[in-house]
Image: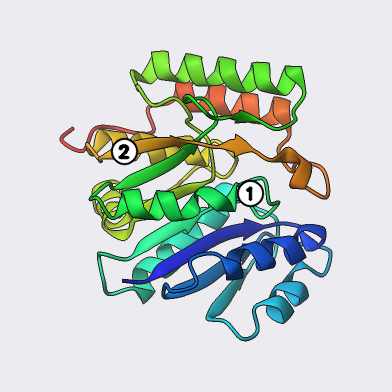
Amino acid sequence: MSMYFLIPVYNESANLDLLAENLLASLQEEDKFYLFVDDASTDDTVFKIETLFQSRPCHIITKDRNRGPGDSFNLGFEWILKESDNEADIIITMEADNTSDICILPKMVNISALDYDLVLASVYVQGGGFEKSSFMRKLISFSANIFLRFVFNIKIQTLSSFYRVYRLSLIKRIKQNYNTIISEKGFVCMFEVLLKAVRLNATILEIPMVLKSLNRKDRSKMKVFSTIAQYIRFVLKPVVRKPDQ
């Protein structure tokens, strides 16, 4: 079994030293491959990745213009599906800004091995939370999660986190049933792929995580009001059907 780390990056140069240190130190006994998808960064992100991961199995997908994290994740998933020939492989997705708590990754991987299709790091289950975040950002996040759970009848608490462990077999099933793994370009992409997994009756488990905003060296790339608009548009269009429809 191999582990593919799928990490979208956009002007993350200031965060890469700590990210590389954490990734290379974690799960040292495992067969790991690092896949970065660069969203047309204007700093030296690509050069730093090449330098920091030069002695490790690593590939960088570059784009000619910025298309958003959804496009990056979709490109990455498609690349892994072509490269992997083992459905037992897993795909680990996370932010590049070090807000994902690397300490819980071994637990997430171990839970995945118990035949869970998808393991989510959640700030909303007991034990999770925010290390430091503005009241307004937390209120918007909490309200959006409640609204989406109500509209789509989903019991999962955290719907948009990047930090997840997927079984490759789940991504293949999503591709087979929906043709496109992710069609949304913005941050709503994580909810889209989660909703597709739910529609396919995937086995999903959340574990608590504290979002470590203090580890981020620069500002979040997410634009709050633009992201809210993306979620509203998503709710208003029937983008995810059940596979038997």
**Residue picked out by circle 2:** 204
For this orientation, the residue located farthest to the bottom is 55
Q: Quadrant of the N terminus?
A: bottom left
Q: What residue would you read off at disc 1?
A: 68
In front: label 2 or label 1: 2
Quadrant for the C terminus in the image = top left
Quarter of the image holding residue 110?
A: bottom left
First reached walking from the N terminus: tag 2 or tag 1 = 1
The answer to which of 174 and 94 lies nearer the viewer is: 94
The colour style of the image is: rainbow
Residue 107 vertical position relative to residue 198 in the rendered view, above or below: below
Question: For this view, does 92 lie left or right of residue 110?
Answer: right
- Mark yes or no: residue 7 visible: yes
Q: Is residue 22 above or below residue 68?
A: below
Q: Give the amino acid at mark 2.
A: Ile
Q: Quadrant of residue 212?
A: top right
Q: Residue at x 35, y 67 (%)?
A: 81
